[in-house]
């Protein structure tokens, strides 16, 4: 898929919406926030969980619904980190192709989140449904912590 996207976007790799050396400053901030989110969201997961092994191996011993840390603010912090990283590249470069790929990532990410939510509801049942009602998927609520965990 990445090779196909690379080939398909070749004609637009030099098309800029804008060119500004100052755009790198907010891009660096977004990039740093994305890295911070990646690191914090993995704090409550084992390497096994981060690699997706519980989804591959249906009969794993214990599966725990993580609702603490960043997961108390958003259900899918990895997608939020991806969004920050993609926005950083788009804003920093001004390239049309980066904005197009960011738009594509947002659209496909929305589909993936729905699929993940269905899988997590199947796996964790009522506890996940309650969690989903309290905590937004990707964008944290401005008013503060989404729930009282």
Image (cartoon, rainbow, N blue to C red):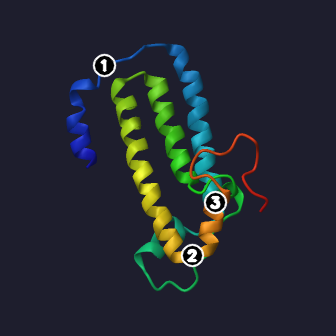
Q: Residue at x 57, y 42 (%)?
A: 34
> Residue 5 placed where, x, y %?
25, 41
Q: Earlier in the sequence, mark 2 or mark 3?
A: 2
Q: Is residue 142 above or below residue 69?
A: above
Q: CA distance from mark 1 to mark 2?
A: 46 Å
> Residue 11 placed where, x, y %?
21, 25
> Residue 105 placed where, x, y %?
40, 43
Q: Which residue in the structure is indicated by mark 3?
A: 133
Residue lying at the far right in this picture: please name it: 148
Q: Which residue in the structure is indicated by mark 1?
A: 15
Q: Earlier in the sequence, mark 1 or mark 2?
A: 1
Q: Residues within 10 Å of mark 1 (few under 14, many from 20)?
A: few
Q: CA distance from mark 1 to mark 3?
A: 42 Å
Q: Residue at x 65, y 45 (%)?
A: 140
The answer to whether residue 140 shows anywhere in this view is: yes
Q: Secondary structure at mark 2?
A: helix
Q: Is 56 left or right of 143, judged from the image as shown? A: left
Q: Residues within 10 Å of mark 3 (few under 14, many from 20)?
A: few
Q: Residue at x 58, y 83 (%)?
A: 62
């Amino acid at each position: 898929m990445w090779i196909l996207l690379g080939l398909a976007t070749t004609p637009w790799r030099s098309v800029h919406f804008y060119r500004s050396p100052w755009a790198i400053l907010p891009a660096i901030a977004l990039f740093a926030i994305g890295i911070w989110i990646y690191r914090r969201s993995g704090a409550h997961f084992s390497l096994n969980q981060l690699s997706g092994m519980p989804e591959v191996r249906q009969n794993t011993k214990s599966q725990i619904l993580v609702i603490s840390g960043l997961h108390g603010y958003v259900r899918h912090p990895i997608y939020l980190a991806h969004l920050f990283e993609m926005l950083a590249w788009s804003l920093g470069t001004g390239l049309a192709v980066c904005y197009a790929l960011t738009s594509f990532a947002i659209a496909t990410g929305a589909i993936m989140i729905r699929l993940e939510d269905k899988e997590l509801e199947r796996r964790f049942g009522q506890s996940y449904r309650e969690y989903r009602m309290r905590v937004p998927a990707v964008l944290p609520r401005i008013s503060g912590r989404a729930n009282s965990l």
